[in-house]
Image (tube, rainbow, N blue to C red):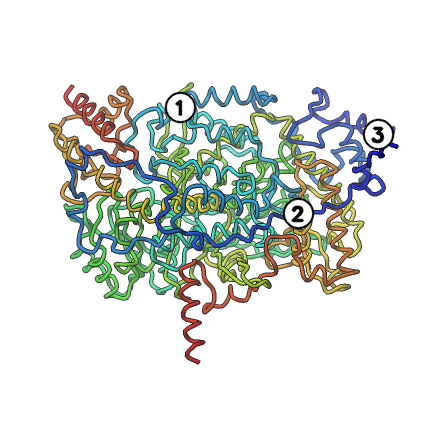
Amino acid sequence: MKKPIQDISAGRFTNGRANLRRYHQAKWDEPVLFELSQPGERGILVPELESAIVQAIPDAMAALPAGMRRNTPPALPQMSQNRVLRHYLRLSQQTLGADLNVDVGQGTCTMKYNPKVNEQLGRDPRMSELHPLQDAETVQGMLHVYHQVHLLLMQVSGMDAVSLQGRSGSQAIYGNFAVLRAWQEANGTLDTRDEVITTIFSHPSDAACAKLLGYKVITLYPDADGYPDLDALRAALSKRTAALIITNPEDTGIFNSKIAEFTRLVREAGGLNIYDQANANGLLGITRAREAGFDMCHFNLHKTFATPHACGGPAVGAMCVTRKLERFLPSPRVVVDGDRYSIVDGGPDSIGKISSFMGTGGIVLRAYAWARNLGAAGLREVAEIAVLNNNYVMNELLKIPGLSAPYAKGKRRIEQVRYSWEKLSADTGIHSEQIGIRAADFGVHYWTSHHPFVVPEPATIEPTESYSRADLDEFVDVMRQVAHEAYTDPEKVRSAPHNCPVNPIDGSVLDDPHRWAVTWRGYQRKLRQSQKAANLS
Amino acid sequence: MHFKDTERAVLKADSKHPLAHMKHIVYPYIPNSVPEVKAAMLASIGAKSIEELYAEIPAELRMQKPMDLPEPLLSEHALKRHVQSLLARNRHCGEVLSFLGGGCYQHHVPAICDEINGRSEFLTAYAGEPYDDAGRFQSLFEYASMMGELLEMEVVSIPTFDGHQAAATAVRMAGRHTGRKVVLVAEHVNPEKWSVMLNYCRSDLELRQVQFTSEGVLDLDHLRSVLDDQVACLFVDNPSYLGVLQDGAAIAAAVHACGALLVVGVDPSCLGAIASPASYGADIVCGDIQSLGMHMSFGGGHGGFIATHDDEALVMQYPSRLFGIAPTSVAGEYGFGDVAYSRTSFDKRENGNEFVGTAAALWGITAGVYLALMGPAGMRDLAHSIITRNAYAKKLLGALPGVQIVHATQTHFKEFAVNFDGTRKSVTEINRALRGHGIFGGHDLSHAFPGLGQSALYSFTEIHTQEDIQALSQALAEVTQK
């Protein structure tokens, strides 16, 4: 009798739904690079000096001031090429990139798909081998891209002018505050208006950058329904108000329908309105900064516009402003005359530079390609599906015992939701951070929220448009499983991770000046000192 | 997949959608753009239409018409053709001979650097925990560690945006550390860096410039005359913006005598052969890592580093992430995490140091790969090669009629200023003519350094061969004599 064929796939489903993944991240138990060093090995050779150059210049260092020659070679590792490659490939496998997981758990970060064709184009030598000081006539293609991205962001925001010099969202926030300061200097209010109002659910950089530029920060807390408190705003406004900086929707995902009233009150009080649109993913083609009464906004191209997060940069933060503020934008500017582009000085009122050259050119190109592929209808589809996915996930997640979505009961959310495990934590003693570490055992990221935790035991989930319904179901199933474990086997959650490359870390050393070590050399020195002290005692 | 009739009805009900007249497109980047899936998901949340999800947005704030954007290039092929047609309008440094420097440099980028920073895992990771992103934490710790060896310092930050930002933050750190408000900046600083620092610091600090001598080095007499107990630090680029390597120890002695800190900006690619700023007394060292394995990418390859000794008071002034090494529950296993996180704006908002966020982490990982490949011998050869090629280029160009090397007797690293006053031609004219020879001439200094007349900053790295330098010399001879 012939042996029957086993139905392997049947073992992967329960009641028609995929079982949880039996995941384990790569674990190489990889040494620190210095331990791999073998004296004499080399990873790459530098082009040799031609003999004619050596003859002409026998000792180029002869005229160096005494003491400017290095006496001891740097103690860098000595490794052949493939050994360096292998080490870093192993470390890459111990890094859970967005390409590898249903990355909806890093809420506020907009972990969407970064199309590979854009990466390929960004690595074309006609992009990657451009020097930023080349004459404008040799970079007409690049300047066209800058100009087109300006036009794109003007359409998305309704603003009148754009600068792409910022190298991250936070640097664009900083840049917008520098514009605010320049505008106040021009109209003589810098000394009298020195307060910036923000909300606790706005990004920490909104408050931090205002402070950096010399402003006092007033922080509004949400009202009982989770909205920025309008009465608190009224109370905060005065002749000292320079600006409001606010996100909408905030990290709760609740759209503040009174936003135009917020901006009107600030305007009437004599301040400017700045919109933190780092994440605008749910609003492309839906609603704009201009209609809501803002004077400035910024976008993170590495969030909404699908350029890679790259472990935290390189990135672009685009500053967008209304006509009255255009003359303060960073220098230089790209201008077009007919079909010729030129790079011109920002003029006497410009804040000058916020970063080197014209920012992160390669990222601007990738964002351009992404938007050019989608067009107006596609960008709107991005927003709509991001919102649909978010509300779908919220509906599913809220079926999990112990989890809630504080505020605005029964209302739809935009692109993300800040949830609370308050009840689960009270019931089980398990905290949100621990849920995140256990979730990593199933191959997904998870983020609590920025400090302070206004929402107790927070979790911020942002599905974006990039995941299928089945992907989203898988993430929900992971959350359900971890919550279930918290109630039935809390030690399993508490002792996590179990399937990651490293076991629970003793974080206490990281806050102890005697034990912390930011480099291998620091670690080796402190270790030697500690061992010496132990031997003496 | 099967759909209920009610779900199909939802789809039809959405005919009021402003783009309903358009033919439906399934977008490859948007899985749930499949109409049936969309309908099923709407039904599952009890919504009749997508519009319903936007109910909280007042009508007066809604966009009334679609955005005015070019028609989409939906196929990957069409998009690629289009973008390549734009790229074809650029002339890049790989197809010409470029001598541009001034803060961004053309070096050889090892293939392994691109291989590693193109890996999906690193390219698309972001802010995971030290468990699921253990490799990100370790590789950035190793980056800092290798920089630490090069710099002879024990604390190195996760990269900030660029060398300019690193300088701006470094002097702010010095201001907080000393409680003083005056920052001296050595005059031969990149004008863009000066602008960044001025912009970033002036709400709290007063920046003053210290003059250079006609020899291209810091005027120590002028420095001593402006140092007092209000001065938080001196910031000096060594090598200077004009490429001059100068005596660091003399500067350090003067600065420390008044209780100020010495902040040095350094190009890390010189440190295989040149003394580290720490060795001559720098308290904070900063600079740009673009030269360590990054393509120029029209300014997209920059990242900044900040380094200090492991002095707790100074460590607590960093705004940046600092990744440290830590034991785990298993013997012999390395773990990593954030050191002294409470310093940061992530933890304390406006009460943290400056601000922190996304910057240039992938370039940190790449610079680590570069340093691991180069090792001590590679870094020594690199620095030696660059200094020698610059000396050779000075010799050739300095021999051209009407052409003078500025600060000719100094040792230059990676670039030097060339004066063309004797040719009666402007840098603009010369560079235009050079482009006709397939050469990008040096960056025009006549605006930022009018005192140098018609001068340009010419940069030479390890990739500029003898033949390249001769080709430049011949072309310059030709275009300056016409």
Sequence order check, earlier mark of 3 and 1:
3
Q: Is residue B205 above or below residue B460?
A: below
Instruction: Looking at the picture, tell me which residue is in the foreground, A39 or A89.
Output: A39
Can you identify the residue that label 3 sits on? B2
Q: Position of residue B361 (x, y in %)?
A: 48, 46
- Label 2 is placed on what type of residue? Gly
Q: Position of residue A178 (x, y in %)?
A: 43, 46
Gap between marks 3 and 1 measured at Cα? 51 Å
Residue A98: name its quadrant.
top right
Name the secondary structure under disc 2.
loop
Q: Is residue B161 above or below residue B282?
A: above
User: Residue A214: which numbered mark, if any?
Assistant: none
Mark 3 or 1, which is nearer the eye? 3
Q: Disc 1 is attached to a residue of which chain?
A: B
Can you identify the residue that label 1 sits on? B90
- Label 3 is placed on what type of residue? His
Report whether residue B319 is seen.
Answer: yes
Gap between marks 2 and 3 measured at Cα? 29 Å
Q: Position of residue A7 (x, y in %)?
A: 82, 36
Q: Disc 3 is attached to a residue of which chain?
A: B
Asked if marks 1 and 2 fall on the same chain, the answer is no
Q: Quadrant of the N terminus of chain A?
A: top right
Q: Disc 2 is attached to a residue of which chain?
A: A
Residue B110: name its quadrant.
top left
Q: Is residue B37 above or below residue B122?
A: above
- Label 1 is placed on what type of residue? Asn
Instruction: Looking at the picture, tell me which residue is in the foreground, B53 or A10.
Output: A10
Q: Quadrant of the C terminus of chain A?
A: bottom left
User: Residue A443: which numbered mark, if any?
Assistant: 2
